[in-house]
Amino acid sequence: MIRPGDGSGQPVTPSDDGGRPTGEAATAVIAVHDAAVVLGGHRVWHGVDVRVSAGEFVAVLGPNGVGKSTLLKAILGLQRLASGRISVLGAAPGRTRSSVGYLPQRRSFDSSVRMRGVDVIRLGIDGSRWGLPLPGRVARQRRQRIDELVELVDAGRYAHRLVGELSGGEQQRILIAQALAHRPRILLLDEPLDSLDLPNQAAIAGLVSRISRSQEVAVVMVAHDVNPILRYLDRVVYLGPGGSVVGPPDRVLSSDSLSALYGTPVEVLRTSDGRMVVVGQPDSPVPHDHQQGGD
Amino acid sequence: MDDVHFSVNLVADVVQMWSQPFMVNAFRAGTIVAVLSALIGWFVVLRRQTFVGHTLSAVGFPGAAGATWLGFGALSGYFAFCLAAAVVIALLGGRGSGRHSDESALVGTIQGFLLACGFLFVALYKGFLNGTNALLFGSFLGITSRQVVVLAVLAVVVLALLAAGGRPLLFASTDAESARVAGVPTRALDLGFLLVLGATVAAVSSITGALLVFALLVLPAATAHRLTARPARSLALSVLFGLVAVWTALTATYYSPYPLGFWLTSIAFAGFVVAAGGRALRERRRRGFRRFAW
Ligand SMILES: Nc1ncnc2c1ncn2[C@@H]1O[C@H](COP(=O)(O)OP(=O)(O)OP(=O)(O)O)[C@@H](O)[C@H]1O
Ligand SMILES: [Mg+2]
């Protein structure tokens, strides 16, 4: 449960959300409060405060190894917190599994996987059910739902082929369809744009944003490059070596806020087409620019 | 068996074969084992646990040898050792998906040690040397009605478990992380599957011998996997291939001087080669066609 007014935890970093009225927390589908995670004796992150409401699109950014995937796992209930609280749809993480869709990081099927795209999507619908699947009404509904999902992610051309033979972008759409199978209210995506070309990045970003808006799904997407999703974002969670910042993209992805986070001068530049380039951060550029022009 | 001859009249052949009680038991046991191993083997291939399957079968040999030495009968030895090995593999190496590379090193180590034990038991039980062949390469002689009952009970239990947990097992086998997030108890399934696999390998060993378990456990399933990607169809094909292999091999053994293990392995392997070759040909043709179309 979210306990409003519990301000005892001291966020080490500036947090835009920190001072929001408590009424806001009540409508949040995900509420992370002053959370910290310790892995192998090492504090991955701490003092993280995030609230995500229905239909919001939130990005988690930060350098490699800073704990972005760990944050998603904590929200899923797969990672225990060292301190703080997370509530998902008003319950403890992991209690509301069917309402949360998840796409793990860097998942791809190698060519030996003998399953079709529709079989993979189907696992999202009834893969966790016990008992024999019987023909009849349920089976018809399931087939109908698979068709809906295939159409939603626009995978009709290849959904009946073996997933192992599909391209990275095509596999990603199949997996997003699988994650959406239960009509989740929350979608957690871990670098879904990874290893996609620019047109595919744009297409998947648009697709996710459309799903988020039209179906009121709260989306938390870990991203390596913020540019493909920048214009859809409501909020950014930036995990850095010195702590974390949460807020609207403009405010978080600014020279001042990132300089404070990295503890060294960092400059954020805007190109004429609205892309962001970060200059001067120590390693692992996060919102970096692709030199090739986008769409 | 010297006076039996295969004729063109299949019905008469079968009637003649089944007039022998030991052949009836062999067919009963073979049928049960074929269905069981085709279904479990389908998941073994899917989960890429064929090496574990091989280890469990190698472990069955010292089990059977030891049990014979102590006077318990080979079947109980297969079961005791295969199940115990399954538990050990599950506890030591079966974290997560059960497909870790360090698992295979561990499994290989256990395999070597237990094979050595098997030879020790054979050496200790001197009069038993003639039976070593049967333990290693299979025999259809001397299957008792009691053994058939044991196999049938096991098959019913395993089929019920598969019917109940088939879908979560499929999910966990192809995509453990998503399955876990969706609430599938993947670790329990890993352990449960290893135990069922241990029992299945024990049952198959009693027909094929410890070294030829693959002929029934892996080949029909691998053949089916090559022919179709649809899970239900593939499972059904696997069972069909297993049954055909067992029935043909038993008949061929009855009417020929060659041993069961040879027939079983050859028939299953031939099926696999035909399926794999057919698929390669089909893919080549499809690709060639595409090239033309462009
Ligand atoms: N089981 C573990 N034991 C100890 N440390 C771990 C464990 N799992 C992850 N870590 C560490 O926790 C940190 C955060 O890992 P995480 O995967 O969340 O990073 P990330 O931000 O997602 O990185 P990337 O951008 O590379 O995906 C890393 O430093 C990693 O080495
Ligand atoms: Mg990560």
Image: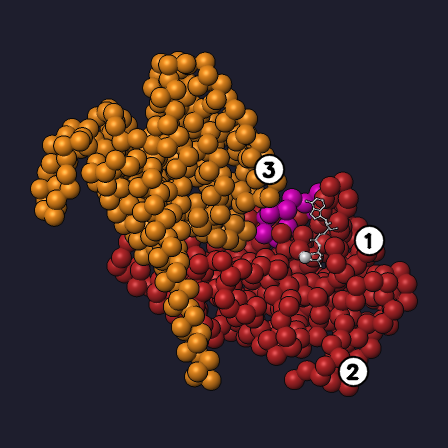
Q: Is residue A108 magenta?
A: no
Find disc 1 in the rendering and name its residue: A12
Q: In the figure, the red chain has which letter?
A: A
Kind of residue at disc 2:
Thr
Q: Is residue A80 magenta?
A: yes
Report in which chain the residue with disc 3 lies.
Answer: B
**Residues under labels 3 and 1: Cα distance?**
46 Å
Between A115 and A102, the one nearer to me in the picture: A115
Find disc 2 in the rendering and name its residue: A271
Q: In the figure, the orange chain has which letter?
A: B
Q: Position of residue A43 (x, y in %)?
A: 77, 46
Q: Residue at x 36, y 62 (%)?
A: B278
Q: The magenta stretch spans which residues?
A: A74-84
Picture quarter with the N terminus of chain B: top left
Are the numbered discs 2 and 3 placed on the same chain, yes or no? no
Are the numbered discs 3 and 1 placed on the same chain, yes or no? no
Instruction: Give the numbered dot on residue B105.
Output: 3
Q: Quadrant of residue B206?
A: top left
